[in-house]
Amino acid sequence: AQSVTQPDARVTVSEGASLQLRCKYSYSGTPYLFWYVQYPRQGLQLLLKYYSGDPVVQGVNGFEAEFSKSNSSFHLRKASVHWSDSAVYFCVLSEGTGNYKYVFGAGTRLKVIA
Amino acid sequence: EAAVTQSPRNKVAVTGGKVTLSCNQTNNHNNMYWYRQDTGHGLRLIHYSYGAGSTEKGDIPDGYKASRPSQENFSLILELATPSQTSVYFCASGDAANTEVFFGKGTRLTVV
């Protein structure tokens, strides 16, 4: 069965520092991968998605992610974080378009400090 | 702008009572979903629907029913609420291709 692991439950970084949030997946085929962000008392918002092609995908607000089939990973990165990036980030896997199965990681809570 | 609206946003229910969570979407999406969010689990799928009149069981359907009377509305029903159903519930909608799923802001349910 497919699964998504986000090994870091909490991450704290200083404002202006670079960021990497890790995501590992388990799936025998080629996955469709997403990163969603959840701000306090809000629903989830899509940051970026990967279906195929260039393994580095760009998202909103300066976020990018890199897909690695050999490592079964889809790590999220940002060159310079802002305090407003403090939120919970979810890595999500789907078997493909049209398939209802979205499998969520447990989430990583990011705190950006001054 | 895609819109998914949940009501109520907060609810306190008594054990054994009936609870109905409502969801409305103005995206004209075929697919709608109910998830619950608990610390350490991410979001888990309770029920989903492919269109008006259809409901399907997700990964954790026990203790929940769903109703999709129209394209726009999808309800989650707890016939006999239990404290273990205390959680934050999210409704979402997606088009038939599921290239992106849009979420509501959530309903915080406390069963006492």
Image (tube, grey):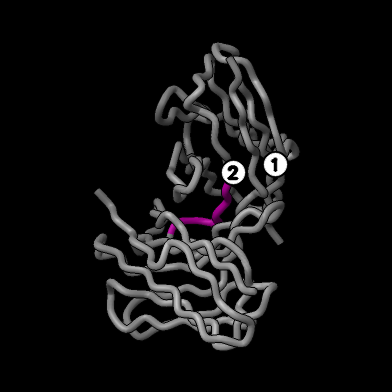
Q: Nearer the viewer, residue B28 or B7?
A: B7
Instruction: State the residue lying farthest toward the right.
Output: A7
Residue type indicated by callout 2: Cys
Above or below residue A43? Residue A13 is above
- Helix, strand or loop at mark 2: strand
Residue B6, quarter of the rendered image: bottom left
- How far apart in space, not on screen, are marks 1 and 2 (Cα)? 7 Å
- Taking depth in this image into account, of A52 and B57 the one nearest to the observer is B57
Q: List x then y, in percent, for residue B108.
A: 52, 62
Looking at the rendering, in which quadrant would you find the C terminus of chain B? bottom right
- Residue bearing the label numbered 2: A91
Name the residue at 28% across, 52% down.
B2
The magenta-colored residue range is A92-97
Instruction: Quickly name the residue at label 1.
Output: A6
Task: Give residue A9's position: percent from left, percent from top.
Answer: 72, 39
State if disc 2 and disc 1 touch (CB < 8 Å): yes
Amino acid under disc 1:
Gln
Task: Tell me whether marks 1 and 2 sit on the same chain.
Answer: yes
**Chain letter of the residue beneath label 2 in the structure image:** A
Mark 2 Cα within 10 Å, few/some/many (few <14, many 20+)? many
